[in-house]
Image (cartoon, rainbow, N blue to C red):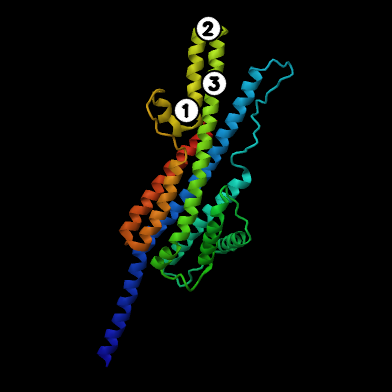
Amino acid sequence: MRKFHSFLVIGLISTMLSACAGFSRIQDPISHFNQAAHAASSAESAFLNAVQVVECEDQFYKSAYDYSTSSDPKANFDLRGYCTPIVVTPDQITTRNTLMSAIVLYADKMQALSTSDNDKQLDANSQTLAQNLNKLAITGGIKLQDPAIVQGVEAAVSAIAKMALDQIIYSNLRNAAQNMQPYLKAIVTALQSENFGFGQAIISSLGHIEMMLRIEISLSHQRGQVAAADTFFNIINARGILIGADPVTKQALASPANTPNPKPVDAAKPVNDALDAIVTGNQAIANTGSGGIYAAANDMYKRAMTAKDIYDSIAKAK
């Protein structure tokens, strides 16, 4: 009897150690996934800020162009570059950051589930965020460019918010990832669609700036208002303005003007690639072991930081 009791104790200890080892193996890659999700959220914010920055540059150059070509003696311009964003307004940015908050909240909950703690509850701030997200979703507070996708996005945000608050249903990481995959995909697809449109607005603004620069340089040169050397430096400065406005288009600016069927520049590609990696990373949690999660999370983090650096450099150039 005593021997049986010893075997039982040893068995229980072995089971407990095995369980702890299991949590340890999964906790680290899930932590990497969580960090990558936060980085992707920062990349999205940087992208939206870049859209506004380039649009404001366009507005400023238009103001300068209108003044330089006006014959009205009362014409004026604003050196401060005051801007009223139209392409993406502050309210629109808030909505899209809210969608990223839902993804980050999901990643935070997954990290909580990966721990060996009995209490898998998120902290008070995260719980409040989840409650606010759910309320926003069920009251029709999410506004997007395409009304057709709003209902699916609202359902996705609500589902993730409820999952974050749950203490019973979603106790298994793999099951949670499998169940939440379509909801993550819905939010990511919506963001990517909107980002593509905003990215085209960046390209359009840059095209407008380039047109104004070309006209001004050409007119000044034709009228003999500047020396040849000044024209040369004006052209160099104009190119610097365009490259500084958006590093995403550097390759396009370097391509010959007569390149047959040039590939359209997608200014949103870096951030949309990072969003794609979120879905891939979650799929790895649902279907693979810790090694696969590590690889997916590292790729996700790398893409997010690359995107953030690109879009941050746009704001720094101003």
* Residue type at the position of mark 3: Leu
Quadrant of image for the C terminus: top right
Q: Residue at x 32, y 57 (%)?
A: 292
Residue extending farthest to the bottom is 1
The percent coordinates of residue 126 (x first, y second) are: 55, 61
- Whether residue 98 is visible here, answered yes or no, is no
Q: Which residue is mark 3?
A: 213
Residue matched to label 1 = 243
Q: Secondary structure at mark 2?
A: loop
As drawn, is 125 to the left or to the right of 109? right
Residue type highlighted by circle 1: Ile
User: In the shown orientation, is residue 184 left or right of residue 94?
Assistant: left
Q: Is residue 207 visible?
A: yes
- Nearest-to-viewer mark from 1 and 3: 3
Of the numbered discs 1 and 3, the one sitting upstream in the chain is: 3
Residue 249 image position (x, y, % from top left): 45, 32
Residue ID for mark 2: 227
Q: Is residue 249 above or below residue 30?
A: above
The nearer-to-camera label among 2 and 3 is 3
Classed neighbour count for the residue bearing mark 1: other residues with Cα under 10 Å, few (<14), some (14–19), many (≥20): many
The residue sitting at 49% across, 32% down in the picture is: 246
Q: Position of residue 12 (x, y in %)?
A: 32, 80
Q: Say few, some or many: other residues with alpha carbon within 10 Å of mark 2 (under 14 / 14 to 19 / 20 or more).
A: few
Which amino acid is tagged 2? Ala
Q: Residue at x 48, y 22 (%)?
A: 239
